[in-house]
Image (cartoon, rainbow, N blue to C red):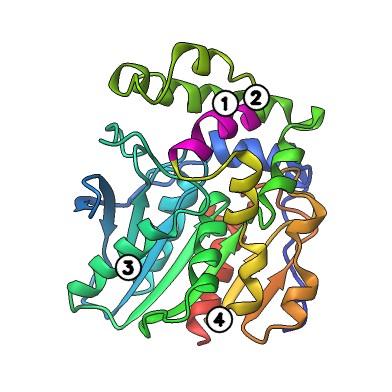
């Protein structure tokens, strides 16, 4: 489909990428949402915790919500859309990726941008409930790449999956990593790396045959982390092999499920390759909206309902 013109207009104070990104990540609060946790046991012996919130009456619709790097299901960018969709008679299943629910996962591996087997496990678990015949997926950042890769790399998507919404999507993981490593994003990169290393450190004692203190101490940047841990723990040759194989960009032409990408033009995390104009124009199932503002997951709007959340609801309702 042609690129969609965006009518997003942020408050005057939220036009700068840094302001909208930081405010949304650190200051936003979403109240009035009740969640209940369910544990999904995985075939490899690990687990994923999902947090459910439900509409006030029975429904055959559910949205799966996927968080970003080092996020979890209680982040406002997850609870915000969960609450909005619940208020519009759609249940929400907010996924905590492996190791992100407050309890360490059991295996040496964890989660990454291309681990679609874990999303598939969640989808299959939901289908066993025999409750929902309409499933939507909304991913944020890392979760957005994961959602698009999931529907683009498979020939047989369950018929119940009706739509995908991907927000602040690093379609090219290498391009996005390069942006994060640039000087303008140094403060973000330091914060991400600190969280990642704190979570990795206990694995030194758990899996001494897989990770040495020398390996751990060699991690000085995000790309080091992917060289030392992400790639090796998940079957890739190195960070570059991981970026190449896990990026959703190559799978966009194959997508047949209606999918909406919302990537702000002032998102400092995204490289030019993360705006798939050609792919959208050549695929009738792929919609691309590029608001001028919004930063990274910072689409601030009225009544504490973010623009990307309103657009996600509009998108699934029109199908």
Q: Are marks 1 and 4 in contact (CB under 8 Å)?
A: no
Closer to the N terminus: mark 2 or mark 1? 1
Closer to the N terminus: mark 3 or mark 4? 3
Closer to the N terminus: mark 1 or mark 4? 1
Decide: few, some or many residues near mark 3? Use Cα within 10 Å; few <14, some 14-19, many ≥20: some
Name the one closer to the observer, 181 or 74.
181
Q: Position of residue 3 (x, y in %)?
A: 77, 76
- Mark number displayed over residue 221: 2
Q: Which residue is mark 3?
A: 123
In which image quadrant can residue 157 be found?
bottom left
In this rendering, the label closer to the viewer, 2 or 3: 2
In this rendering, the label closer to the viewer, 2 or 1: 2
Q: Which range is magenta?
A: 222-233
Q: Position of residue 151 (x, y in %)?
A: 50, 72
Q: Are marks 4 and 2 in contact (CB under 8 Å)?
A: no
Decide: few, some or many residues near mark 4? Use Cα within 10 Å; few <14, some 14-19, many ≥20: some
Q: Are marks 1 and 3 in contact (CB under 8 Å)?
A: no
Q: Are marks 2 and 1 in contact (CB under 8 Å)?
A: yes
Closer to the N terminus: mark 4 or mark 2? 2
Q: Which residue is mark 4?
A: 258
Q: Secondary structure at mark 2?
A: loop
Decide: few, some or many residues near mark 1? Use Cα within 10 Å; few <14, some 14-19, many ≥20: some
Q: CA distance from mark 2 to mark 1?
A: 7 Å
207 left or right, relative to 37: right
Q: Which residue is mark 1?
A: 193
């Amino acid at each position: 489909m042609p690129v969609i013109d965006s009518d997003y207009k942020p408050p005057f104070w939220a036009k700068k990428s840094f302001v909208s990104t930081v405010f949304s990540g650190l200051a936003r609060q979403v109240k009035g949402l009740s969640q209940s946790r369910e544990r999904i046991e995985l075939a490899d012996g690990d687990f994923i915790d999902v947090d459910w919130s439900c509409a006030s009456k029975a429904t055959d619709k559910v949205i799966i919500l996927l968080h970003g790097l080092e996020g979890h299901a209680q982040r406002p960018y997850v609870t915000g859309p969960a609450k909005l969709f619940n208020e519009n008679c759609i249940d929400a299943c907010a996924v905590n990726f492996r190791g992100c629910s407050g309890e360490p996962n059991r295996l040496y591996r964890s989660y990454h941008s291309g681990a679609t087997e874990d999303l598939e496990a969640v989808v299959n678990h939901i289908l066993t409930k025999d409750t929902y015949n309409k499933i939507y997926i909304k991913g944020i950042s890392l979760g957005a790449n994961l959602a698009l890769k999931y529907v683009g790399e498979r020939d047989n998507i369950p018929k119940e999956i009706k739509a995908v919404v991907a927000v602040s999507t690093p379609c090219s993981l290498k391009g996005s990593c390069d942006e994060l490593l640039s000087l303008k994003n140094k403060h973000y990169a330091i914060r991400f790396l600190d969280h990642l290393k704190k979570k990795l450190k206990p694995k030194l004692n758990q899996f001494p045959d897989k990770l040495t203190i020398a390996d751990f101490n060699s991690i000085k940047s995000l790309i080091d982390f992917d060289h030392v841990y992400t790639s090796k723990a998940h079957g890739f040759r190195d960070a570059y092999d991981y970026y190449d194989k896990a990026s959703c960009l190559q799978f966009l032409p194959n997508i047949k499920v209606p999918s909406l990408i919302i990537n702000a033009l002032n998102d400092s995390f995204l490289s030019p390759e993360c705006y798939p104009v050609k792919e959208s124009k050549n695929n009738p199932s792929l919609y691309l909206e590029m608001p001028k503002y919004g930063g990274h997951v910072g689409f601030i709007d009225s009544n504490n309902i973010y623009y990307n959340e309103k657009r996600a609801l509009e998108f699934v309702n029109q199908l």
